[in-house]
Image: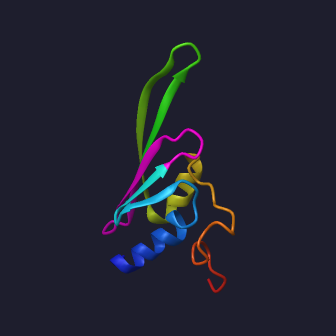
Amino acid sequence: MDLVNFAIWKFRYIEGILRGMQSFDVTTTKYVDPVFKEVSWIRYDMAAEKATVERTEVKHSMFFGETGTITQKFECKFSDLVRTLKDLGMYQELPPGEHHMLAGQQKDE
């Protein structure tokens, strides 16, 4: 996938339509959990058309407060990224009025 098509794909299906997703640079998306504010990363390999999700969770204890941070890595093909994000609880679409009109599935597709 060339750079232009990749940038369009990334905006339309990830950064332009999902809550908490922010463009960090061309090959990286920063995800900030809307509730817990934990930061995770999606790193893209355009040549291999694969993404690596580095999901961070802060563990809490009722009695001791924050007890540690766990970062897990999940690798998938670009075509499986939406499913992977759903499985990880990182996929929440913005309401239609809050995302760019060119983000998401287009009518002519």
Outermost residue, top side: 63
Outermost residue, bottom side: 108
* Image spot of residue 36 (x, y percent): 56, 38
Q: Quadrant of the C terminus?
A: bottom right
* Image spot of residue 7 (x, y percent): 41, 73
* Image spot of residue 84 (x, y percent): 53, 53
Q: Residue at x 42, y 32 (%)?
A: 70
Outermost residue, left side: 47
* Image spot of residue 98 (x, y percent): 64, 66
Q: How many marks?
A: 0
Q: Residue at x 48, y 31 (%)?
A: 58
Classify residue 8 as left or right of residue 103: left
Q: Residue at x 59, y 17 (%)?
A: 62
Q: Residue at x 41, y 50 (%)?
A: 41
Q: Is residue 4 above or below residue 50?
A: below
Which of the 4 image quarters holds residue 44?
bottom left
**Closer to us: 15 or 76:** 15
Residue 16 lies in magenta, yes or no? no
Q: Is residue 54 above or below residue 102?
A: above
Residue 50 lies in magenta, yes or no? yes
Classify residue 97 as left or right of residue 69: right
Span of residues in magenta: 32-52
Q: Is residue 89 above or below residue 47?
A: above
Q: Quadrant of the N terminus?
A: bottom left
**Closer to us: 105 or 64:** 64
Q: Is residue 11 above or below residue 81?
A: below
